[in-house]
Amino acid sequence: MQEKEPQVTFIDRRKISSEGEIRPEALAEEQEANRRQAEQRETAAKAAQPVPAAPAPTAESASKAPNAETSDESLPEGPTAQETADSTEAYQQTTKHLDELLRAKAPDASQLGPVAFEHLVQSMYMTAMMGLGAGTQPGEKPRIDLMGARQTIDLLGVLQEKTKGNLSEDEQRLLESALFELRMMFLEITNAIARNAANPAQPPKPSGRK
């Protein structure tokens, strides 16, 4: 019995036919490839596009700015749900593109992870500590910013009040410990300043020879 020869099918991959015309299949593939490249360029351009800065307030807008004494009816309208979603997506795309650029430029460098609640507390804690004179080099006079430290401590207090009931046990303990240490250090410094003001140091009297 004679065996049948295997059937071989040839697929023409040439873009131009033997008559010198562009094959429709090749034209369609090229158009599809161009479309994908255009979409990729558009996505990369959107990710790299900087977020526009907010316009500087004018005298008219400043006079209309809401304050604590205005009613809720005079407050400006917030962004819509769609605007919030669009800005969030654009921000995430930009930060993702930035992370990719940083990894490509310095692959061995440590990368920033997702921001958590403890990072916020630690950042504000260090800001207040710097205002209370921490981080002063030996031999230097402490640089104290009581009003700045007080504002940061009060902001942590607002954070504690607004997040009540929404924190884990570890987050609550971290926030309470940070507030306790900062408030005690603030009291220690202000009490020392008050004592020095009440009992100023007397300059040494010059010793004269008889």
Image (spheres, rainbow, N blue to C red):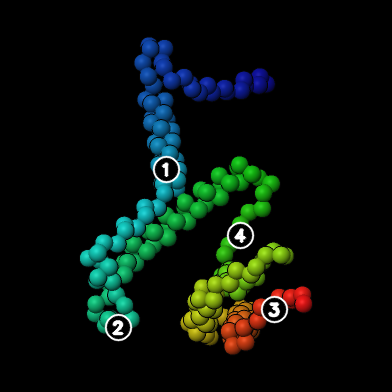
Q: Tell me which label, 3 or 2, sits earlier in the chain.
A: 2
Mark 2 residue element: loop
Query: 10 Å neighbourhood of mark 2: few (<14), some, or many (≥20)?
Result: few
Say which amino acid is labelled 3: Lys
Label 3 or label 2, whichever lies nearer to me, is 3
Q: Which mark is residue 113?
A: 4
Q: Position of 95 compared to 173: left or right?
A: left
Residue at 39%, 62% in the rendered image: 85
Q: Tell me which label, 1 or 3, sits earlier in the chain.
A: 1
Q: Tell me which label, 2 or 4, sits earlier in the chain.
A: 2
Foreground residue among 11 and 74: 74
Residue 88, above or below 35 = below
Residue 125, above or below 187 = above
Q: Are marks 1 and 2 in contact (CB under 8 Å)?
A: no
Say which amino acid is labelled 2: Glu
Label 4 or label 3, whichever lies nearer to me, is 3
